[in-house]
Image (cartoon, rainbow, N blue to C red):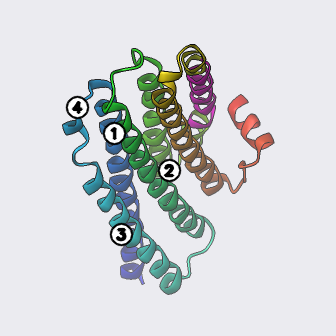
Amino acid sequence: MDHLVRQFDRDLDNLKQKLLRMAATAELMIKQTISELVERDRNLARDVRAEEQEVNRLQLEIDEAAMALLATQQPVAADLRFILVAIRINGEIERIGDLAINITQNVDTLLEQPPLKPLIDIPMMADVAQQMVRESLHAFVRRDVLQAQNVIANDDKVDAFKNQIIRELLTYMMGDPRSIERALALILIARHIERIADHATNIAQDVIYMVQGRDVRHPKGRREEAQQ
């Protein structure tokens, strides 16, 4: 019996490690795409599509491993919540990888034309979103509700960056119609980064559910978490 318990613990740890590897790959994809944008160097994101394949491969492995644990071990209470949350986080990270690919596509459009403006806010916004992704996974591994709450609170910073960026780019578009295509590409990048932060927030909310059994996904619950 002890042998079975130890094997179950090893399987849970393996699941955790794969999620961390998947999240680290997705975070690297974000960093590379933003570096490509800022430095205007396509070589900086040359590995992004291969990394997307790695994220997709890990997603399938994690899903299969989690479903096998549910079917064979019939976990209860905290272990059951851990596995269910791992499945949800798996989907969130896969979507973060997709959003990094979307950013790369918009960057391709921008690199075909001269720079529209100095890029300051978008890299800062991306740094916050990357940190949220990293901290949400650390909160998952450590079962750290306080760190999860910090991730949720930081979502407002990303939203503020997005609103500021859109306002500024709208002035460019109104002032010069030739700027519209580039401004729209930058607006889409800001929106993709915002969605990355939303997925990190979802992960943080799942961590709170896993640890405390509370669902804080609705707006009222999110405000309460940010205030605590």
Tell me whether circle 3 and circle 1 mark residues in contact (CB < 8 Å).
Answer: no
Q: Is residue 40 left or right of residue 131?
A: left
x, y (%) of residue 10? 35, 69
What type is the residue that disc 2 sits on?
Answer: Phe
Question: Which residue is the site of mark 4?
Answer: 41
What type is the residue that disc 3 sits on?
Answer: Arg
Q: Which one is closest to the eye, mark 3 or mark 4?
A: 4
Q: CA distance from mark 3 to mark 4?
A: 42 Å
Q: CA distance from mark 2 to mark 4?
A: 35 Å
Mark 3 secondary-structure assignment: helix
Q: Earlier in the sequence, mark 4 or mark 1?
A: 4
Q: Which one is closest to the eye, mark 2 or mark 3?
A: 2
Question: Which residue is the site of mark 3?
Answer: 10
What type is the residue that disc 1 sits on?
Answer: Asp
Q: Which mark is residue 108?
A: 1
Where does the magenta region start and end? 151-167
User: Furthest residue to the right?
Assistant: 220
Q: Earlier in the sequence, mark 3 or mark 4?
A: 3
Q: Is residue 99 above or below residue 61?
A: above
Magenta stretch contains residue 175: no
Q: Earlier in the sequence, mark 2 or mark 3?
A: 3
